Amino acid sequence: MQRAKLFFVTNAAMIAAIYVALTYVFQPISFGEVQLRISEALTILPVFTPTAVPGLFVGCFLGNLLSGALLPDVILGSLATLLGAVGTRLLRNAKPVLAPVPPILANALIVPFVLRYAYGVMLPIPLMMLSVAAGEALSCGVLGMLLYRLLKRQESAIFRRQDKRGQGDDFS
């Protein structure tokens, strides 16, 4: 039981670290009213493992915080990613093409209000919703689905492991 908890926390931490690194490396295009957050491609991971849900939330929180985002962005942006990750996890048994929809919608509905009220961006909210949705569609829909295809090929090797007795531990 303890091994399973340790595995869960360690796996979530690795996902968070990758999210933070991608957000930081691609910081110039990860923020603003027109954004392409490469790290959001990772929002496909809840299809494969529940550890991705807290990992994505913590990763987004730290990525925003360490990149100098304002507090409302740190909190609400992270909550948008959490909602998207939970939605993706709930759709794990649906058609794979539906998996990116929750993070696209969550960010399109939340981030424009953060841009308006935290950063003072005066573009029309519907326009920012479209802009954020387009960026999310590219990162979650296109890059995320590419990641999905790569991971799906090796799913059993990556997301399941064998213990010493040869019995598989399934963490999904």
Image (cartoon, rainbow, N blue to C red):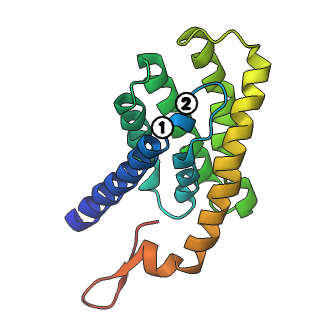
Please count the marks in the image. 2
Regarding mark 2 in the picture, which secondary structure is present there?
loop
What residue would you read off at disc 1? 27
Residue 86 position in % (x across, y down)? 55, 45
Q: Are marks 1 and 2 in contact (CB under 8 Å)?
A: yes
- In the image, 41 versus 67, the foreground residue is 67
Residue 90 position in % (x across, y down)? 61, 52
Regarding mark 1 in the picture, which secondary structure is present there?
helix
Residue 155 position in % (x across, y down)? 52, 76
Residue 171, relative to residue 133: is it above or below? below
Residue pictured at 64% horizontal, 12% vertical: 121
- Mark number, residue 31: 2
User: In the rendered view of the protein, which quadrant contains the N terminus?
Assistant: bottom left
In the displayed structure, does residue 10 sit left or right of residue 40?
left
Q: Amino acid at mark 1?
A: Gln
**Hey, which quadrant is residue 115 in on the image?**
top right
Residue 115, relative to residue 106: is it above or below? above
Q: Tag 2: Cα neighbours inside 10 Å, few (<14), some, or many (≥20)?
A: some
Residue pictured at 59% horizontal, 26% vertical: 32
In the displayed structure, does residue 130 sit left or right of residue 108?
right
Residue pictured at 64% horizontal, 50% vertical: 140
- In the image, 55 versus 140, the foreground residue is 140
- Mark number, residue 114: none
